[in-house]
Image (tube, rainbow, N blue to C red):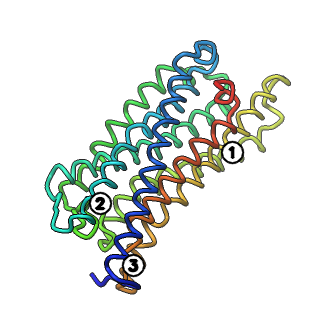
Amino acid sequence: MFIINTSSNMSTHVSNIILYIAVIIFAFIGMCLSIVVLLKMFFNRKTLRKYPIDCLLFANSYFVLLGVFPFFLDMCISSIYGYLYPHSSFDGFWCRFKSYLTYIHGYVYFYSFLLQAIYRFYRIIYHTQTKFQSFRLYAIASIFLWINGFWQMLPSLFLGHINYIPNEFHCQFPLTYLEGSLIGLSIMFLIPHILTLVCYLYTMYCVRKRSSELGTINQRFNTKRDFIIFKRIVALFTIVTLSAIPHVIIPVSYAIFGLLSSWVCPFQWLVTVIALNGVAVIQIFMFPFLRKLF
């Protein structure tokens, strides 16, 4: 791998350490925010009773954030320590396993948006079929997401897609390994995003085609409200997916040009953690039942 160095190694290390410190700060903020939201949900019985499925699905997202940010902290601390003590090494199965767990959280996070889209689809199009709107169904589906994430990402762990990065002192999908990065990241966020968009477009098609069959005025109001929430879910999912683009563009760029700047690894994680925090805050203001918690 050829690394572009625009300055001395010392200045490069300093800039990367600053980026990793920024990731630590945002990860810590995200952990605190997730704890606050989850506690607000748990102790607000009125909201839980009125919006049980909404609370379940969004709680799953915040639980993912609460679980993944400690791995970000561990990754950044390892990298900073490695920059300060260059002869250090954290290579080993435990390093890869921690990265594997990080990607599982990412898998569940992105697919939770798809699960929310499916829930809105049935509320809008099949509002009379309550069997598709049961709390138990989506509780089981949420658990299934975690189980599915474990085995879907398992090949990446044992086929060598997740590797130790000596220059960064932590494990991840190597930015220089195009095939492994594309396979892993496609499973994590490309597939659920495409399926969410398809679900949204089909819902929009059905709403326009069957607008005269939506029932009472009250039902039409509920449908309009759910469709607005659906659009907001798609918009947020698109934002957070765009934040993951550096994880794809960087390996593709390396495959084409064979060049990789030394700062891109901490930069991609900084973009990711900022986007996750941004979506976590924005959805509090975008979704009425979350606003009521505060």
Q: Residue at x 47, y 46 (%)?
A: 110
Question: In this picture, is 133 found above or below 263?
Answer: above
Dot 1 alpha-carbon crowd within 10 angstroms: few under 14, some 14 to 19, many 20 or more: some
Q: Earlier in the sequence, mark 2 or mark 3?
A: 2
Labels 2 & 1 near each other (Cβ < 8 A):
no
Cα distance between the residues tagged 2 and 1: 39 Å
Under mark 3, the amino acid is Ser
Q: Earlier in the sequence, mark 2 or mark 1?
A: 2
Q: Where is residue 276 drawn, in percent x and y?
A: 52, 48
Residue under pointer 3 = 261
Question: In this picture, is 15 found above or below 209?
Answer: below
Q: Nearer the viewer, mark 2 or mark 3?
A: 2
Quarter of the image for residue 223 reads top right
Question: In this picture, is 57 found above or below 197?
Answer: above
Residue under pointer 1 = 231
Front residue (pair 251, 149): 251
Q: Quadrant of the C terminus?
A: top right
Question: In this picture, is 192 found above or below 125?
Answer: below
Q: Secondary structure at mark 2?
A: helix
Residue under pointer 2 = 79
Cα distance between the residues tagged 2 and 3: 16 Å
Tell me: 136 left or right of 168: right
Dot 2 alpha-carbon crowd within 10 angstroms: few under 14, some 14 to 19, many 20 or more: many
Q: Nearer the viewer, mark 3 or mark 1?
A: 3
Q: Where is residue 140 drawn, in percent x and y?
A: 41, 26
